[in-house]
Amino acid sequence: MSTSQSHESKNQSWGGRFTESTDAFVEQFTASITFDQRLYKHDIAGSRAHARMLGKVGLLNSTDVEAILNGLNQIEAEIEAGSFDWKVSLEDIHMNVEARLTDRIGLAGKRLHTGRSRNDQVATDIRLWLRDQIDHIGYAIRRLQTGLIQVAEQEADTILPGFTHLQVAQPITFGHHMLAWFEMLQRDYERLMDCRKRVNIMPLGAAALAGTTYPIDRDYTAELLGFERPTRNSLDAVSDRDFAIEFTSFASLLLMHLSRFSEELILWTSAQFDFIRLPDRFCTGSSIMPQKKNPDVPELVRGKSGRVFGHLMALLTLMKGQPLAYNKDNQEDKEPLFDTVDTVLGCLRAFGDMMPHVQTKPEKMRKAAMQGFSTATDLADYLVRKGLPFRDAHEVVGKAVGLGVQTGRDLSEMSLAELQSFSDVITDDVFTVLTLEGSVAARNHLGGTAPEQVRKQVAIAKALIAE
């Protein structure tokens, strides 16, 4: 039988008004069971709650409820044992489970679908699944933040050059730099938890689009499933995928941060910077150049950001032209969402495993911080404290830097007489501000790079993630 021919039987869940069976290719093309079977736990959980609710309101008798619950438990065990027979002809996770339930327990299985539709069922399944994944991702972010705090505490006094425009700007501490990444992740975590609030709303009971004529108790079902409340509008309930777009937006911001993070690690491990060493187990070699040690994990995370950005655009495009209520287009929401979750969890695991084991090279970083006149701003601030207007101080320091460029010396390597040739307010106390240690220690205020501030922020960060 060719793939363009029709099957002999019609789909029993909806085929009553059809006079011919679905084309074999169309059956394959429209089925989602190859990817939505990962929702099985949540589909079964939703069916358990729905059955209990139907029993509570008198739409199912206790015998049917018990049979349904036992049957669902057996189906879940079959799936987890790998013995469940998934059928493309049944299209999706919902009908595969329902058909198997009916095979097991008879008519009671057919009664389970009373008061619901696949439209509200799939919306509920996705929310249940995503809620669980959000919790896993939240834990993974906290784990990575814990690693960053550990490194920040260890390296609170370690000096490296801070950059703007990828040019040496001012000396900072490595611990301060780690806490910058911590702050990015903290915003990501807060966005994720805020997204969870809107995920945790229950569509079940909206039925196809208009609600149902049966006397269902949606508050009770929501309570059983741990939802904050049921949705308030049946049309919106079955057609809304804002929560998936919002989650993928969160994921895009997170991957953007991890990509920036990756870029710095890649630069820092290069021979040109040589600031850090990544453990060998997070790197690979070259098939032709035996000396190479490639930072593949950060490079791959940097690349995966584009994958997640693409999923966000795909979901936005998917939804932008849809009229209310549910449309088959929405079947295309799952694969981008599933892959986004898988990608995020993988990237967070890689970084969570790697970061606590990063080794710094303090002497290399210190030498780099001595280049590029990183304490020039400190000299300007010094002159301002001596009474010069900032713009005049800026000009004085610019001339001093010019001499340094000509002679190949840092400001701290010039003699007092040379510095005084640019301004007579300079005295021998200037050298305390021209050292790298003096520069970072002077920035001892909330948000500053001083080691004392780094330690204070480490304590605050520890308390924050312990909440």
Image (cartoon, rainbow, N blue to C red):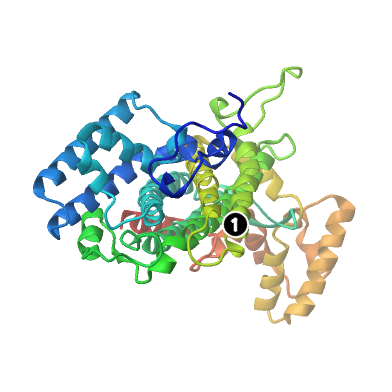
Quarter containing the N terminus = top right
Q: Dividing the picture into quarters, in which one does residue 267 lie?
A: top right
Please say if 174 is above or below 90. below
Q: Residues within 10 Å of mark 1 (few under 14, many from 20)?
A: some
Q: Which residue is mark 1?
A: 318
Q: Which residue appears at 53% of the width and 38% of the height?
A: 27
Asked whether, in this view, residue 173 is left or right of residue 150, the answer is right
Question: Which residue is more in the foreground, 79 or 210?
Answer: 210
Identify the residue at image location x=45%, y=45%: 144
Coordinates of residue 404 in the picture (x, y in percent): 83, 56
Asked whether, in this view, residue 38 is left or right of residue 334, the answer is left
Residue beneath the point at 49% across and 44% down: 19
Please state if 335 lies on the left or on the right of 195 as rendered.
right
Q: Seen from this angle, which residue lies furthest right?
A: 406
Secondary structure category for the residue under label 1? helix
Front residue of 202 and 149: 202
Disc 1 residue type?
Leu
Residue 97 position, x and y percent, is 33, 38
Is residue 173 visible in the rendered structure shown here?
Answer: no
